[in-house]
Image (cartoon, grey):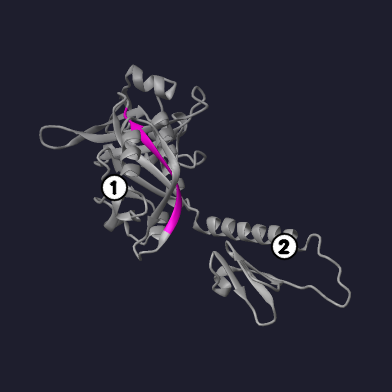
Amino acid sequence: MVADFDGRLLFSNPAAEKILGCGPIDFAPQDATSIYGWYLPDQETLLDPEQLPLVRAIHGGTIVDEVVFVRTLQQQSGVWIKVNAWPLRDSVDQIHGGVVLFQDFTKDREAMRALILLAQVVKQTTDSVVLTDKQGIIQYVNPAFETTTGYSKEEAIGNTPRLLKSGLHDAEFYRQLWAKISDGQSFEGMIINRNKAGNLYWAQQAITPIRDDSGQLTHFVSVLQDITELRKKQEQEFQLQLARNIQQKLYGSAPVLDGFDIGASAHPAYETGGDYVDFISMPDESLIIAVGDVHQVVPFSGDPK
């Protein structure tokens, strides 16, 4: 769209008319914002006439890639446009008008907002997210990765995920993993990693290959969930279940003996220092039986073997 120094519209091409929903109209410059429906980003407040890109260009300003919302009677759903504008000058640098060039930015803006939202999700999730190129060089890590591993993003970027190797998986494990994802397949499984402080942790990991529009593999994205505490809880539940099974087996049908009380208790072996399988005779002719992570004290007389 082109206007003279007084703000009168001189020219509007078909593309501008299609985006705005109307062609050139005679109007006073101060009415332009309402006629063409130019709004602030809140989509409710009309732009001040003096802030219209075309008016600012006539006053000597230059606008580069400014985003504005436009809604008219003919374009009631509204569109987002990206605007560039500049003054028209003669050979002696006098301003005689202004030009505004704009394009429909609605779809691009929606895509940009989706990308921003996705970036916020990746940034705020409690799972570690790692992006590498197809050679395995780390390009990005989220804050959760820094918290879980102890490595800062500056230490991780440019490195490879090998910095987390625990030494508990053999070379064949990593060879098969790399062969699978390099072939474009996803990987899911549990991996034992080692953080910067040298501590081991269990991670439920998913690695997904990323392809471009032509189908070429370009990146890998890895999401790791620290399940160390979950595994500890599962192990404790297993120990308690084992103790329960032993108690039920030993005491489920305890004999009734006149003048005797039978008592016993069960404890995890790591609390008492017991071995996985051990028999310890006691002075009172009872016997400690340690099986797995549980030991049992029972009355006994005779040879433990």
Residue 17 drawn at (x, y percent): 39, 20
User: Between residues 19 and 258, which one lies in front from this camera angle?
Assistant: 258
Farthest residue to the top: give it.
14
Tag 1 residue:
138
| Residue 28 seen | no
What's the residue type where badge 2 is placed?
A: Gln
Badge 1 crowding class, 10 Å Cα cut-off, few under 14, some 14 to 19, many 20 or more, is many
Badge 2 crowding class, 10 Å Cα cut-off, few under 14, some 14 to 19, many 20 or more, is some
Task: Indicate left or right for 242 with 216 as reference.
Answer: right
Magenta segment: does it hold 208?
A: yes
Point 79% across, 60% down: residue: 252
Task: Indicate left or right for 146 with 154 as reference.
Answer: right
Say the numbered circle drawn on residue 247: 2
What's the residue type where badge 1 is placed?
A: Ile
Q: Nearer the viewer, mark 1 or mark 2?
A: 2
Image quarter hosting the N terminus:
top left
Callout 1 touching callout 2 (CB < 8 Å): no
